[in-house]
Amino acid sequence: MVSTQKRMIITLLKGMMEDDDQVFSMTKMIRRKTCLIMIMMMGMFVTTTYAAGDTNNVYSPCLDAKVQTGDGFTFGIAFASNKQSFLQDNGGPQLSPCDRRLGLASNGASVAVFRPKVDEISLLTVNRNDTASGSGYMVAFAGQKYAARSLPIMFADNTHTITSFTLVLEFSGGTLQNLFWKSYGCNSCSGGGNICLNNTDCAVPNSKCQENGGSGCNIGIQLAFSGTDKNLDVLNSWYEVKNLRQYSLYTLYSNLRDTIVAPYEKFF
């Protein structure tokens, strides 16, 4: 009787152990499947992230591009000594700097090319040494069939340079429609020999920029976007700049640079 009970207990224990082994095997299987699913999800995430990067393969400012938020967008800024350089035959309609009829190269003009990310506020800097000496005007442009260009805007006279600008790129369905220079008046223009050029922008004396060994005043351009991208998503960065229009990103950048770099310049 006792032996029979022992055999029943042993059989029961073996069954429980086999069940535990099955449970353990199933647990391992579930874990393996879970890990596999997680790896697949990570792969999908990486693929999606990669696909959401820069999809614009147009790198020339003289070609058309259709962009979405997060793409890079290439445009140019042309610099010349007078407004007439941007007009056909020095008095006709304004043409895009991409138009060979302007002959900008023969007029001593220079061009800077930028590729900011769509709908991100960017700060562009232009070395004054790379622009026309003395007084100067600049035009922002991009595109071929949709050849958008800004109006010429003065950035310097013979003694002063405007060091802070705001440029807005307006899109419709991902295609550039226009470029606008925004001015906020001369309320912040006071002291230090600063003057108000054209009653619209505050200009800094070139001599002030040369005090620390520089050869001229660099130009800072706050860049923002408006309109819609090719997915018809609204571009909002212009509204952010508009709400912060009392501040100059270039001034903030310059002050930060002076605070961090100036104490160590003697070592370089």
Image (tube, helix red, strand yellow):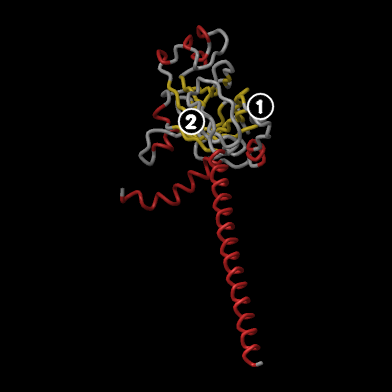
Give how far across and how far down residue 73 sits, in percent: 53, 30
Vertical relation: 32 (above or below) 196: below
Reply above or below: 111 against 107: below
- Residue 259 location in percent, x, y? 45, 51
Q: Is residue 268 left or right of residue 233?
A: left
Question: Callout 1 environment at 10 Å: few (<14), some (14 to 19), or many (20+)?
Answer: some
Q: Which residue is rendered at x = 45% and y = 27% of the image?
A: 112
**Which one is earlier in the sequence, the residue at label 2 or at label 1?**
2
Q: Secondary structure at mark 1?
A: loop
Is residue 244 left or right of 261 when viewed as pictured?
right
Res 44 quadrant in image: top right
Q: Position of residue 219 (x, y in %)?
A: 48, 33
Residue shown at 56% from the left, 7% from the top = 92
Residue lying at the far bottom of the rendered structure: 2
Q: Which of these two is toward me, 211 or 266?
A: 266
Q: Nearer the observer, disc 2 or disc 1? A: 1
Q: Residue 173, labelled with which disc?
A: 1
Q: How many marks?
A: 2
Tell me which residue sits at (57%, 61%) in the image: 29
Circle 2 residue:
114
Figure quadrant of residue 134: top left
The amino acid type of the residue labelled 1 equals Gly
Closest to the observer: 53 or 23? 23
For label 2, the crowd category at 10 Å Cα-Cα, with few meaning under 14, some 14 to 19 and many 20 or more, is some
Q: CA distance from mark 2 to mark 1?
A: 21 Å
Q: From the viewer's perspective, is residue 117 above or below residue 64?
A: below
What percent of the width, then of the height, locates residue 37? 58, 53
Say which amino acid is labelled 2: Phe
Q: Quadrant of the N terminus?
A: bottom right
Residue situated in front as seen by the camera: 7 or 206: 7
